[in-house]
Image: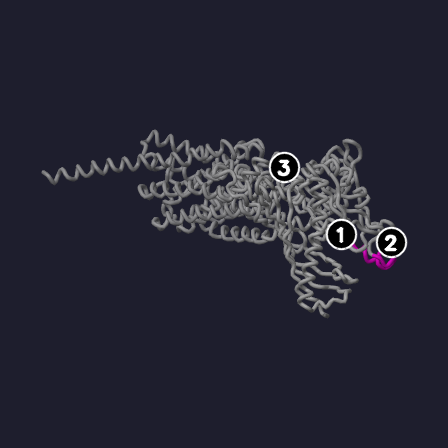
Amino acid sequence: MKPRSIIKSSGLCLLIFNIMLLSGCWDRQELNDLALIMAAGFDIKSDHKIELSVLVFIPKGGGSQQGMDVSGEIGGGEQTLVRSAEGVTIADAMSKLQEILPRKIFWGHTDVFIFNEDLAKKGVSKQVDFIMRHPQLRERGQIFVSKQKAKDILKLISPLERDLSEVLRELGEHKIGLSVTTKELSEMLIGDSKDYALPWIKILPAESSKNPKQTIAYITGTTIFKQDKMVGKIDDSLKRGLLWLRNEIRLAVVTIKPPNTDGYISLNLYNAKSELTPEIKNGKWKIVLHAESSSDIVQNTTNLDVSNPVIVKKLEHYLQEEIEKRIELSRNRVQKKMKADVFGFAEAFHRKYPEIWNREKDDWNEIFPKVEVTYDIKTKIRRQGLTS
Amino acid sequence: MMKQAKISPIQMALLMNPAIAATVLLLVPSITAKQAEQDSWISPIWASVIGFFVVFIAYQLNKLFPEESIIEYSEYILGKFLGKLISAAFLFFYLHITGIIVREYGEFVSATSLFNTPMTVIIGSMVLVCSFAVLGGPEVIGRVSEIIVPVVMLLYIIIFILLIKDLEVKNMFPIMEKGIKPSLMGSIVPQSWFSEFILISFFLPFVKDKKKGMKWGMISVCSVMILMVLTNIMNLFLFGKLTASLTYPVMVAARYISIADFLEHLESIVMAIWIAGTFIKITVFYFILSLGIAQWLKLSDYRPIVLPIGFLILLQGLWSAGDLQELSHYLATTGAVYILSFQVPIPVILLLIATIRNKIQQGKGNKQNEAPVNH
């Protein structure tokens, strides 16, 4: 019995030893062999060529402390590394990029994608295909369209955040402007109208005393795409109206000027919600925008007594008119001038009137500019702040 | 053979759940969404009818032959030659299906994480682990699923809860835009999965409390249906029309989770769910294949043939498809008909013939019994 058990156990040991040798090393990836891509930018190079620029995270070991001692500033030029390469597709450019990067490109942490305006004019759907198809890339990455070259934006040295990808991701998450993830864009690309909107960014001018690169890019408007072609953009003052129509408004301060007074009242909006209710009557396509919000008074430069309920009722009325005016302005621009359905009217009609929609969907381009929009806006002023 | 091993009806229900649901959760939502679009959540409800039906058939057959599996009683019912032929076809079918399941597992693992690892190693290591469980017998498989299934369910529910803030209920409308047809069409592929519940006929002889076998079988079908409805609803609310164009929607859904900027990159949970679930699924199919072949050859024990069969499964997995496109195209088209045509008509015909023969025999028996009394 004894020698048999020795043979048995030694055989078992051999087996276990084999397992250690065989434990799959084919896909071993060491962190210090990876180039973590934080953001990617796409520029147009020539008719067929795209320039891919990537922002690579520089892992730092102990260097920051020294930097603090010498200049009193964290980081400096070494914080960001931007490399770019050209190719006919993104994947092609990526393979060229790998030639000049000593570490293996790793897309798992890419949060920001920037498309230059000139490239975006030709549509972004072909490039989004890469982002959706690549197994490493996550679908929560945010997409922006930039005024300046994407490469130049990536090269900016952000004074407050770690790098530019962090800046844009945080700005996008505030939802002050439009923010669109890859998943949402892909949904819009196969939606009923195939029109979409993307946030528009540009470089904030640097303080004159500082390095011109020491600044950030910020969301300043919205670009509108019709049938995968960029047809125009709306600026800061109009983008809010768009957010109301898309039910994406989260944070806003509205300032109104009550008639017969010489000051302003600013209100902080919260709990904002909006909903599109479609209606087809006698062949007329109509949309009612129901919007609800609460607000607090944050500043009052008029001589009105905001603790008086009668005046508050009036203020609520003025606020409704102000919101309606803003929405109307941006709706007019997008619906009548650009004729792009970025509000989701098509989906709303499809959901409520599937039969009519399936009959008439081929004529949607003609119907859309004629859709009548009415508003049903309810606001409630809840509090007047800490003084009266 | 092996009749001393006993499992409880609850264990049977627990091991049947991942035996059906494990592969459904990754590939089927997208296949269903292609046909049914926003009605994809209705399709599993239609498809589960086949599941209930098949469990009923298996239970009725088990009532007639309480100690035998389908391989053994097909001989009694159809005669030696025809019975052997049918059960051989059945066993070849299960060898093929097990190969496909193993390949689905391999394709998923290699497409999402292990790009360079050879398929042989990915599949081979899984089959090896499963063979240990199969060698342990039905009791071991039952207990393993008792441990794994609740954990898998919990993780799955956690994913669902974490996604709630990103879900858009309006993606569900209009319900039944083009009538009932798209959701019925979308149910064909899940039906083929539900028909795999016929495997229960192999486990019923091991069940301690046979009367509860039917009840827990039905509960198992129900749980798979609820799981599939939940999965399709989650994908529909999160991706809308996009579901159809994603290869592994559940995986992408888990990746989309982002809570407070730090609870991210949760795709590893899906990997854990998938691998634990497929482990049980492969083990169940592997066990049935080994047991079936042993019964077909009238061996006294199935254990000696477990490892050789594992080798066959490995090869079958490598041969079953050229690539992922071929595999999922096959499952979405001819595969569904192929799987359904084996697992539904054959047991139904067996039950019909068995019932008729029983009636005739009973009639004969009564006459023979009456004859001596008259004398």
Q: What amino acid is found at the position of numbered circle 1 in the picture?
A: Val
What label sits on residue B46 in the rendered view? none
Who's the residue at 76% across and 40% down the image?
Answer: A42
Tell me which chain the residue with mark 3 is part of: A
Q: What amino acid is found at the position of numbered circle 3 in the picture?
A: Trp
Q: Position of residue B358 (x, y in %)?
A: 26, 37
Q: Secondary structure at mark 1?
A: helix
Quadrant of the image containing the N terminus of chain B: top left
A68 in magenta: yes
Q: Position of residue A249 (x, y in %)?
A: 68, 53
Relative to the observer, which residue lies in front, A166 or A135?
A166
What label sits on residue A207 in the rendered view? 2
State the predominant SS element of the stretch in magenta. Answer: helix
Q: Which residue is mark 3?
A: A364
Q: Is residue A34 visible?
A: no
The residues bearing labels 2 and 3 have C-alpha atoms spaced at a distance of 48 Å
Quadrant of the image containing the C terminus of chain B: top left
Q: Which residue is mark 1?
A: A167
Q: What amino acid is found at the position of numbered circle 2 in the picture?
A: Glu
Q: Which residues are magenta?
A: A59-73
